[in-house]
Image (cartoon, rainbow, N blue to C red):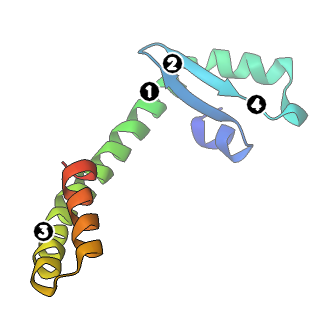
Amino acid sequence: MNLRELTDKGVLLSLVGDDKISVSVPTDINTPELKQEIVANKPQLIEELRLQEERAFMVLERWRVDSIPQWQKALGESIEEGDITRKAYAEYMLNDVLK
C-alpha cells in the first residue's frame, strides 16, 4: 500500500527523523492487517514522504521568491500613500515571513 492509498483512507503519516514515521489511523480501519501492511511498506512510505517534503519545500521557496517583489512594491506604495497599516503588514511579510 502506498502513501496515496493510505491518505485516501484517512491515515496520517509524517517523517520522524531519517528512518521513522509517525502514523495516525482512524479507529474504524485500525486493524492488525493494516499495521502489518504499513510496516511492510515502511521503506517505500519513507521515500514517498521525503519526496513530498521536498516538493512542498520547492513550492514554498518559489512562492517566497515570487512574493518578495510584490511585497516590496506594496511597501513602497504604502509609504507613498501614508498607509501605516499596509506598511506595517508589508514590513512584517518581508522581515518575518519571507526572509
Which quadrant of the view contains residue 76? Answer: bottom left
Evaluate if marks 4 and 2 touch, with contact meaning CB atoms under 8 Å apart: no
Query: Disc 2 or 3, which lies upstream in sequence?
Result: 2
Amino acid type, mark 3: Gln
Q: Report helix, strand or loop for mark 2.
A: helix
Residue 75 is situated, as x and y percent measured from the top left of the image, at 15, 72
Task: Give the residue number, with chain letter if any, for mark 1.
Answer: 47
Distance, label 3 to label 4, CA atoms, is 44 Å
Amino acid at circle 4: Val
Residue 65 percent location from the top left of the image: 17, 57
What amino acid does circle 2 point to? Pro
Closer to the N terminus: mark 1 or mark 4? 4
Residue 12 to residue 96: above or below: above
* Few, some or many residues within 10 Å of mark 1 (<14, 14–19, 20+): some
Q: Residues at badges 1 and 2 in contact (C-beta under 8 Å)?
A: yes
Mark 3 vs 1, N-terminal side: 1
The N terminus sits in image quarter: top right
User: Does residue 34 appear to the left or right of 93 in the view shown?
Assistant: right
Q: Nearer the viewer, mark 1 or mark 4?
A: 4
| Residue at 26% from the left image edge and 57% from the top image edge | 92
In this rendering, the label closer to the viewer, 3 or 1: 3
Residue annotated with mark 3: 72
Q: Would you name the residue on which mark 4 appears?
A: 25
Mark nearest the camera among 2 and 3 is 3
- Whole-angstrom CA distance, mark 1 to mark 4, is 20 Å
Q: Which residue is identified by label 2?
A: 43
Gap in Å between the C-alphas at discs 2 and 3? 44 Å
Q: Residue at (65%, 35%) from the top-left corner? A: 12
